[in-house]
Amino acid sequence: MEQLSFIEEKYNDPRPPLALNWNLWHGCTRASTGCLHCYVYRRDESIGKDPTILHKTDNFNLPVRRLRSGQYKGMYKVPCGSHIYTCFSSDFFHPDADGWRNDAWEMMHERSDCTFFMITKRPERIADHLPNGSTYKKGEIPNGKYYVSGVDTSGANSWVQPDGDKCRRTNSAW
C-alpha cells in the first residue's frame, strides 16, 4: 500500500526540522523607548562596533543554501519544516533594509515549507513593505507561515499572520 503525505515531494526531507536564527542584516536605530536597553547596542558597543550602521551578513541567503556533499547533497542546508527566527540582530522592517527586503521575501517564498518568526519595533511599516516582486503582487504575502510581532514597553503586542492573500492583524496585551 502506498503511503500518502501532505508534504509535497520536493519537501520530502528525512532530517528533523531545526529552530535557528537567520540574521540577514545587522544593526539598527532606536525606534522607541522600548529600545533603550537593546541587546544589539550592548553587544556591538562592547566590541567597539557602531550598532546604527546596517549591513548585510554572510548569512543573508542561509535558508536557500544547498548542501554540496554528503548523504543529503543537493538538499537545502536548513531542513524542511524548520522554525526560522528572522532578523534578531536588527529589525526586518528597518528603513535602511528596504533595498534588501524583496530578496528576503523571495527566499522565504522559496522556503515556504518553513516557518518564519520576526519581531519589529516598526509595525507601522509592515503593510507598505510586504513583498513586491515577480512572484506575487504588491502587498501579497508569499506562501508559507509568517509571524510578525511588534512589542514595546506599552505592553501591547501586535501579531500579523497570513490569512489567504492578506495580512490579519490581532492585538492583545500580555
Image: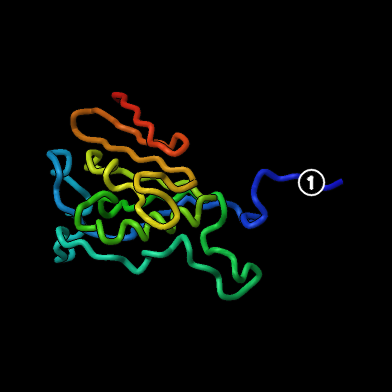
- Indicate the quadrant containing the C terminus: top left, top right, bottom left or bottom right: top left
Amino acid type at image mark 1: Gln
Q: Which of 11 and 138 is in front in this view?
A: 138
The reply, left or right, for residue 52 in relation to residue 16 is left
Which residue sits furthest bottom?
69
Residue 68 image point, x, y percent: 56, 75
Q: Which residue is drawn at 45% across and 34% down?
A: 163
Q: Which residue is drawn at 16% across and 65% down?
A: 49
Check the image and report above or below for 1 versus 134: above
Q: Residue at x 47, y 36 (%)?
A: 164
Q: Which residue is drawn at 16% across and 44% down?
A: 35
Residue 165 image point, x, y percent: 44, 39
Check the image and report above or below for 50 versus 130: below
Mark 1 lies on a secondary structure that is: loop
Q: Nearer the viewer, residue 59 or 132?
A: 132
Residue carrying label 1: 3
